[in-house]
Image: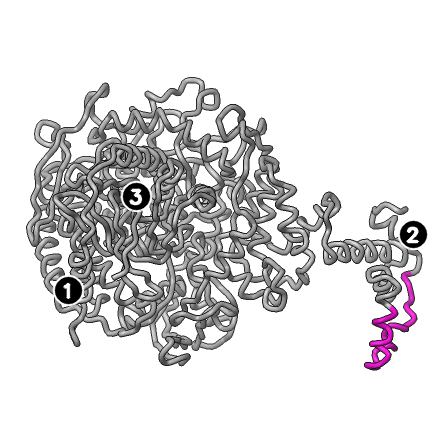
Amino acid sequence: MEKIEYDAVIIGGGLAGLMSAHEIASAGYKVALISKVFPTRSHSAAAEGGIAAYIPGNSDPNDNPDYMTYDTVKGGDYLVDQDAAELLSNRSGEIVMLLERWGALFNRQPDGRIAVRYFGGQTYPRTRFVGDKTGMALLHTLFERVSGLNVDFYNEWFALDLVTEDKRVAGIVAMQMKTMTPFFFKTKAVVIASGGMGMLYRHTTNSYINTGDGFGIALRAGAALKDPEFVQFHPTALYPSDILISEAARGEGAILKNNKGERFMAKYAPKKLDLAPRDIVSRAIITEIREGRGFPGGYVALDLTHLGEEYIKERLALAYEAAKNFAGVDAITEPIPVRPAQHYYMGGIDVDIKGRNPDIVGLFSAGEAACVSVHGANRLGSNSLLDTLVFGQETGRAVVEFLNSSPHEPTSNFEKEAEKIVDDAYKFVKSESGVHFGEILEKLRDVMWDYVGIFRDEGGLLNALSEISKLRGMISSMYVSDKSKVYNTEFFNALELRNMLDLATVIAKAALDRKESRGAHYRTDYPDRDDNNWLKHTIAYLRGNTVEITYKPVKITRWKPEPRVY
Amino acid sequence: MSENLQEQEVIFKIKRFNPEKGFWWQEYKLKVDRFTQFTEALRRIKSEQDPTLSYRASCHMAVCGSCGMKINGEPRLACKTLVLDVVKKYNSNIVTIEPMDYFRPIKDLIVDWDEFYDRMFKVKPRLYPSKEVLEGKAEHRLKPEDQKELWKFAQCIWCGLCVSACPSVRIDPEFLGPAAHAKGYRFLADPRDTITEERMKILIDSSWRCTYCYQCFNVCPRDIEPVTAIKKTRSFTKLYKEKSEVAERGEKHTEAIFESILKTGKIAEAAVYLKTYGILQSLVDLIYMSKTGKLKYALVQERYVQNIDEIKKIMGGESK
């Protein structure tokens, strides 16, 4: 097998991965970035509404970073590590200004400074935006910036598994998709920034590529996931194609209505109304639909007709376009049909505030793949773009520190392990007949949606665990019918499914064990938050077919838990 | 929203490829409704019928640029195209899907983009801000109207459809292509950038190699109008000192057309030709034309527009 050596290897070419790459390469280290798509195709591009930032001198005069931290902590239902949230708020203005300097085309105020809008759960408006394609604008800016540095891009390469030596990173095996050639990347540091996992769910706003590969790689290497039970559902996905209708729509004044024309959020969040956090709005919508106040097919109406054509087309261009193209609805004159869909994963690879994983020396993670934890039980809108950049940078800097301290040099001989990883990947799909990935995948997506979704209970979760376990058994007889030696997407889909099933097992078990409701994790059999027993992070390892769960305290600095009313 | 999903069975004829077998067509039947995007149809074909089918797709909302392909012969993003819209437009429930033109095929609908990326990187696609700003000692201000103008061209998603549709790219290796020009102009026009001279060197000669066929304008899924970016880039030629032969001739040609219309109300072909190419080259071409029997076209006596001053008055244009 070909071998190549780097100081650090990054898995994922979205905002978090690129930001880490920027920091490591700028410090003079040799860095490779492996992405299964060309970086601008990453899911960061799909982020719409904006990035939260307190910018001194260019924010609401009453606002300050502490309000931002408080909003984040409360929004996350107090499962947020408060030191992380403070860092996020304190660095927000700086990071947004950095992207501006690099050329990001933020919308402007008449005086030429960066403009601002409201988002859900914010005490004061602090979302900075580029129309409603903020993610795309920032991703292109950062990719273009990093492509001018000394970073080796391995685009359309698929990462298989980590190689470790005495619980230290020794390298990673990846395969070039075009030629199906495996490479061993020998390295001391690996940053997993591979994004989220929406494809586990029947309905998701995520890209097709979001199959949770990084979680599978980390779990198989023996690293833990933190808070894996926390899955966010976005309240306003376009019916029926699940394309995201940005929260910016409600931020700009759009109103949710049921089939009676009632502004139903008045019942569920009398103060914040349509701008309550996502978990609350999602459950409200599902409740309306279940109680017969939705529209046939299962959706509610998002009304922005009162905003006027010019405003809609300038500030909500994508929402307008999506409604028109994908639902045949002209949002200027009629409401947009929406329903909740999986949107974001608060859980992730267990890392500290510098992106370091405690289980494996040299393993780092950032962005949606990581759980710092800054979003706790529920992420506020416009905090994910901010998270990718702030913690992408922190993690990159931590990698530099790690490399500077001249750590242990991995032994040079890893051929056997690397070969075994490739054999395992092929073995697992080498049968001559059997089921193909699609059969298992479609079942998994239904099981997750039905039983590990917006509302959960013990019976459903037990059922999900047994179904997932069956599906996981089936993949040993999975059959890849395509024997092609170039760009064999069926092979890669099968590998993605392996990652998805490893992750699904952990999510369902952690959700079963957490006997309370907090943020996005809502148990109908335990409808209240239980701080006495459950104000703690879940730490989950996957050992073969067993999920081992321990707990870790939440870091509380200044904000004591209080009831979460909006 | 109407509840009628208009479910219907559609036959997908997909042009497939692998290096061992070469090209072949394969048919799949699938029931779709009026909201089914081509990406979703492909995903279902792959997961329900034929896992060997290969294509690229990511965001399914027209911002990532992965799923460019030809649908019923038209270059499209598969996600931005609804199956039943195509069925209705062509009045047939058989639709064809092929890989994008121009690029080398790798596997089924997946083509090789390497050369496309090379073109994009040639234009130095990133802002080069001043040292003060980069070090945080100064701050950019950007007028809302400038932001609006730049954002239009910054929305290129690197999907490659415009390049696959561009005839000039195929015949002129010196032409950077529409996507690279859109990207190049986005930075050329950015008041925050500091390498304008270098950008002009990269872009101006190439900008005069576009033939204004508007194919890029037609196929761009983000309505960038790369051809508009090219036009706007040409307007920088005046500021640029080291003009290439192509740029110089292009400028002359533009001036000749302007003058001709101003004077006569028409493009007087012969006069424009003479002005653009000069007497010597025109004489050489005249000999060629007489040999090929095309001289008669050059000698057509044109009738100019009458009352040109009246027209100028009505149009509100300035008269010299």
Mark closer to the observer (1, 2): 1
- Give how far apart the Cα atoms at labels 3 and 2 are: 73 Å
Mark 3 is surrounded, within 10 Å at the Cα level, by few (under 14), some (14 to 19) or many (20 or more) other residues, namely many
Residue shown at the point (46%, 57%) measured from the top left:
A325
Task: Look at mark 3 in the image and give the residue it sits on.
Answer: A7
Verify CB contact (< 8 Å) between mark 3 and mark 2.
no
Residue span colored magenta = B283-305
Residue B309: image tag: 2
* Subunit under mark 3: A
Give the answer, above or below, for where B106 lies relative to B290: above
The amino acid on which the numbered mark 2 sits, given as a three-letter code, is: Asp
Residue shown at the point (13%, 61%) measured from the top left:
A471
Give the answer, above or below, for where A219 lies relative to A425: above
Decide which of A292, A365 is in the foreground and name it.
A365
| Main SS category, magenta section | helix
Q: Is residue A176 magenta?
A: no
Q: Is residue A409 visible?
A: yes
- Give how far apart the Cα atoms at labels 1 and 2 are: 81 Å
Residue A475: image tag: 1
Decide which of A130, A432 is in the foreground and name it.
A432
The amino acid on which the numbered mark 3 sits, given as a three-letter code, is: Asp
SS type, badge 3: loop
Which quadrant holds the N terminus of chain A? bottom left
Q: Can you give x and y, in whole percent of width and height, for residue B13 in the image? A: 41, 77
Mark closer to the observer (3, 1): 3
Q: Is residue A202 visible?
A: no
